[in-house]
Amino acid sequence: MKMNMNKKNLIYLSSAFLGGVLLVFAIIYFSAQGIMMKEKQLNISFAEADTLFQQTTIAKGWKVVTVHDMQATMKKNGKDVKSIKVYELCHPEHAYKVLSQDAERIVSSLMPCRVSIYEKSNGKTYVSWMNTGLLGSLMKGVVPEVMKDASRESEEIISVLLSK
């Protein structure tokens, strides 16, 4: 009888632990979009946001490396989507701190920083970006500092859009 009780307790304990782990994973999964990816609705048109974003980026010392017009790309492939542009941004000083060191170059696949401006079916314009500060905090070397600075500065650029 004692052995059965221990097995029973072990089963209950294991079940509770597994349930807790599943709950934590579910919370992380369903909240990841609000943690790792950020999105804000804008009070200006897509065209205004496009122009203002590029001007502000350059004024803040960043470079607009490439603009991917995803609506045009999709149209070339026979697909119709609402306006969407993905901007690749680079701050040469930040990039140099990472790219000049062999041990840090592994994060180059996350470079350059990206921001998207798009329309949704509700007719509103949105901006989205990755929480690079949070992502950087999971790394080592100079990367956490660089990604924290890049995150702060890119959010300053985005805040200009949000203030309109």
Image: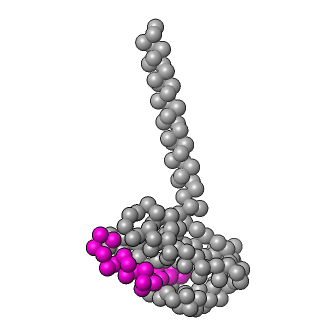
Query: Is 51 left or right of 140, judged from the image as shown?
Result: right
Query: x, y percentage for residue 151?
Result: 52, 73
Res. 66 in view: no
Could you say which is closer to the camera, residue 30 or residue 98? 98
Q: Quadrant of the C terminus?
A: bottom right
Could you say which is closer to the camera, residue 76 or residue 156? 156
Residue at the spot x=49%, y=27% of the render? 13
* Residues rendered magenta in the picture: 82-104
Could you say which is closer to the camera, residue 90 or residue 93? 93
Task: Give the image's coloring scheme.
Answer: one colour
Magenta stretch holds residue 83 = yes
Query: Could you say which quadrant of the image residue 38 lies in?
Result: bottom right
Query: x, y percentage for residue 129?
Result: 54, 72
- How many marks do you count on the picture? 0
Query: Could you say which quadrant of the image residue 155 lies in?
Result: bottom right
Query: x, y percentage for residue 107?
Result: 36, 70
Residue farthest to the left, as pictured: 102
Could you say which is closer to the camera, residue 57 or residue 73? 57
Residue at the spot x=34%, y=78% of the render? 99
Residue farthest to the top, as pictured: 1
Residue at the spot x=48%, y=14% of the render? 5
| 124 in relation to 10, above or below | below
Magenta stretch holds residue 1 = no
Residue at the spot x=50%, y=75% of the render? 149
| 39 in relation to 125, above or below | above
| 29 in relation to 17, above or below | below
Query: Is 109 left or right of 45, judged from the image as shown?
Result: left
Res. 155 in view: yes
Query: x, y percentage for residue 10?
Result: 46, 23
